[in-house]
């Protein structure tokens, strides 16, 4: 992960070289093997230290989307990281996260292009998790282009993948929440709003990121609007528009508010 950020990579290389090279050279010139051991320990220590720094910096990139709803900036930063990342395992996860970013802005064309760049998922716990994330994103893609048949197929595959015994229970619980929300959203898209209001009221209380909360609130507001609870819908749409940053949910909520005002 150090290589994902140029400034961190440069800092690591300089720091590792300042101590590692002199110690390694001293072990040869002075014939003291203990100095070579110190050189290895020096390089290893700073590799761990700068890896932690890089992980925290990437967490800040994720925060741009999940907590601050600055999705355009998140996409820009993730594309930069992708251009520097050579690790195939890491690239798949970055691509999945990037596809989510594009979908959360409503850019289905770029999301589709990202799907086409994904590598096959390995037969492992990591592969099962990545496949589930992909199917969740794919279902949203089909919902956005109103391809309900393929959205249903993606949901069916998602449920099967969640049942993979290799997945930890915590991941299963998290993924099943997405499955349940997508299922109700699909029914709503088809015109079936039965139970939608109650489902998304409960779902809104369970969300632990700002982005997922506004996504659920947007669906809840649509359910209110269908039930002719205009005042409740207006309040939730306003919250989504205010908190949603540059997400598609905020943009759509503003459109809904404008339409309500014309009534």
Image (cartoon, rainbow, N blue to C red):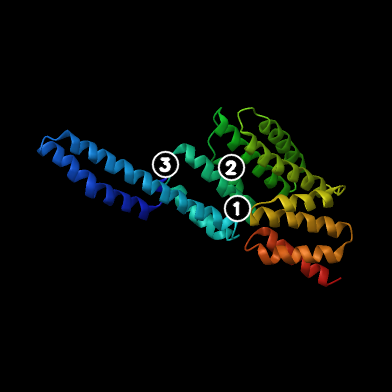
- Left or right, 214 with respect to 9, comes to right
- Residue designated by label 1: 102
| 62 lies above or below 121 | below
- Residue designated by label 2: 115
- Left or right, 192 with respect to 131, comes to right
Residue at x 74%, y 45% (from the top left corner): 182
Dot placed on the residue nearer the N-terminal end, 3 or 2: 3
The disc at residue 86 is 3
Circle 2 — which element?
Answer: helix
Mark 1 to mark 2: distance in Å? 11 Å
- Left or right, 206 with respect to 81, comes to right
Mark 3 to mark 2: distance in Å? 18 Å
Q: Position of residue 222 (x, y in %)?
A: 80, 57
Quadrant (top left/top right/bottom left/bottom right) for the N terminus: top left
Q: Position of residue 259 (x, y in %)?
A: 80, 68
Residue at x 78%, y 45% (from the top left corner): 186
Circle 1 — which element?
Answer: helix
Mark 1 to mark 3: distance in Å? 22 Å
Residue at x 65%, y 55% (from the top left corner): 211
Identify the residue at the far right of this view: 228
Dot placed on the residue nearer the N-terminal end, 1 or 3: 3
């Amino acid at each position: 992960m150090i290589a994902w950020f140029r400034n961190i990579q440069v800092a690591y290389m300089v720091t590792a070289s300042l101590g590692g090279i002199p110690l390694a050279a001293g072990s040869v010139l002075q014939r003291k093997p203990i100095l070579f051991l110190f050189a290895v320990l020096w390089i290893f220590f700073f590799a761990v230290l700068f890896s932690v720094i890089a992980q925290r910096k990437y967490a800040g990139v994720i925060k741009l989307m999940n907590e601050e709803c600055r999705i355009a900036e998140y996409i820009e930063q993730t594309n930069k990281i992708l251009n520097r990342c050579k690790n195939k395992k890491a690239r798949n996860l970055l691509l999945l996260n990037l596809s989510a970013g594009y979908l959360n802005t409503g850019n289905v064309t770029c999301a589709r292009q990202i799907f086409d760049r994904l590598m096959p998922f390995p037969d492992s716990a990591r592969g099962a998790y990545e496949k589930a994330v992909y199917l969740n994103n794919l279902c949203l893609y089909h919902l956005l282009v109103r391809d309900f048949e393929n959205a249903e197929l993606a949901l069916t595959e998602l449920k099967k993948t969640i049942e993979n015994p290799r997945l930890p229970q915590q991941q299963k619980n998290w993924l099943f929440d997405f499955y349940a929300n997508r299922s109700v959203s699909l029914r709503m898209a088809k015109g079936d709003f039965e139970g939608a209001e109650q489902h998304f009221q409960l779902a809104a209380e369970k969300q632990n990121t700002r982005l997922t909360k506004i996504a659920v609130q947007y669906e809840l507001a649509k359910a209110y609007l269908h039930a002719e609870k205009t005042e409740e819908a207006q309040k939730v749409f306003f919250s989504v528009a205010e908190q949603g940053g540059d997400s598609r949910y905020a943009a759509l909520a503003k459109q809904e508010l404008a339409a309500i005002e014309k009534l």
